[in-house]
Amino acid sequence: MDFIIVMKFRSKVGRETLSRLNNLCEKPPPGFKPHGMYFTLGRYDVIWHVEADDQLKVTEVVVGLSDICSTETFPAIPREEFTRRFG
């Protein structure tokens, strides 16, 4: 399953925060596969595209980040799959 996670940092971003995010991207937990993390300008600081076995796995990861950022997670359907089913 694909998910989009949007993040808003709770305070100034330091090396420790960046290190934690890099570790999740480079050494993700089983059942969690990051595809792209983008730092943005505007309402959210980070937009992250991930794939996970299920919603509980994504929840496990974002709860672990709750001390550094607030998050919102959206289930996402790839364009090709959506078109195949509904197009």
Image (cartoon, helix red, strand yellow):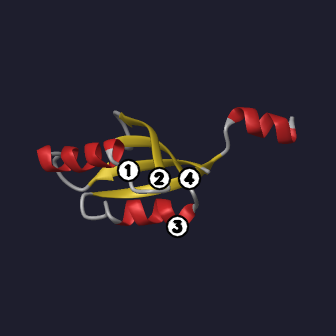
Question: Mark number for residue 56?
Answer: 3
Q: Find the distance from the CA under tag 1 to the CA under tag 3.
A: 15 Å
Residue behind mark 2: 32
* Marked residue nearer the N-terminal end (1 or 4): 1
For the image, the number of numbered tags is 4
Q: Residue at x 50, y 56 (%)?
A: 31
Asked whether the beta carbons under mark 1 and mark 2 sit within 8 Å of each other, the answer is yes
The amino acid sitting under disc 1 is Pro
Q: Find the distance from the CA under tag 2 to the CA under tag 3.
A: 10 Å
In the image, taking residue 61 as reference, residue 15 lies left or right, namely left
Residue behind mark 1: 28
Q: Quadrant of residue 87?
A: top right
- Mark 1 or mark 3, which is nearer to you? 1
Q: Find the distance from the CA under tag 3 to the CA under tag 4.
A: 13 Å
* Marked residue nearer the N-terminal end (2 or 4): 2
Residue behind mark 4: 74
The amino acid sitting under disc 2 is Phe
- Mark 2 or mark 4, which is nearer to you? 2
Depth check, front residue: 34 or 86 = 34
